[in-house]
Amino acid sequence: QVQLVESGGGMLQAGESLRLSCVASARISTTSIEAMGWYRQAPPGKQRELVASISSDGTTVYGDSGKGRAAISRDNAKNTVYLQMNSLKPEDAGVYYCKVIGMYYSQMNIRLPFTSWGQGTQVTVSS
């Protein structure tokens, strides 16, 4: 229901800051985006863990990996979510995925929920 384009990340040094962006483009006009968030997966194959999420009314939730050093924000007009993380540590490395939860109307005019994931952006933190 939405296409997600992530940007940011790359190779960073410990102590530097990370800024990620995720733009959601709706494929159909009846799509509404409710929650947007960032998850981290490290190492590969491990379950993705919540870094932070934000709902359409601005309510934020931070996972253990994001508490204290991360700040999530959102531009509803642009359907974009941002993640700022300061004082990076090597354990912050991993693949960061954008996740969007929303609703859309099917062809039968039934309102249905959807969840979409971005392709992920690699973050490497060297000490």
Image (tube, rainbow, N blue to C red):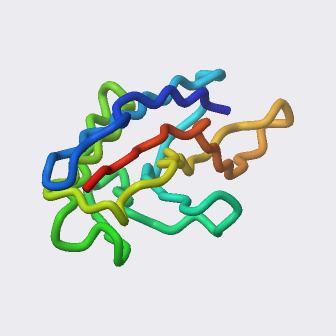
Is residue 36 found left or right of 127 in the rendered image?
right
Is residue 101 found left or right of 35 in the rendered image?
right
Q: Nearer the viewer, residue 62 or 100?
A: 62
Q: Residue at x 50, y 26 (%)?
A: 5
Residue 25 spot, x, y in % from top left: 52, 23
**The N terminus sits in image quarter:** top right
Is residue 98 found left or right of 20 in the rendered image?
right
Is residue 111 found left or right of 14 in the rendered image?
right
Q: Residue at x 61, y 44 (%)?
A: 117
Residue 124 spot, x, y in % from top left: 39, 46
Residue 4 spot, x, y in % from top left: 54, 30
Q: Residue at x 26, y 62 (%)?
A: 89
Q: Nearer the viewer, residue 97 or 46?
A: 46
Residue 67 spot, x, y in % from top left: 24, 73
**The C terminus sits in image quarter:** bottom left
Q: Residue at x 48, y 58 (%)?
A: 40
Quarter holding residue 31: top right
Residue extending farthest to the right is 108
Q: Nearer the viewer, residue 67 or 33?
A: 67
Residue extending farthest to the front is 127
How many numbered circles are shown?
Answer: 0
- Residue 64 vs 92, above or below: the answer is below
Q: Nearer the viewer, residue 31 or 89?
A: 89
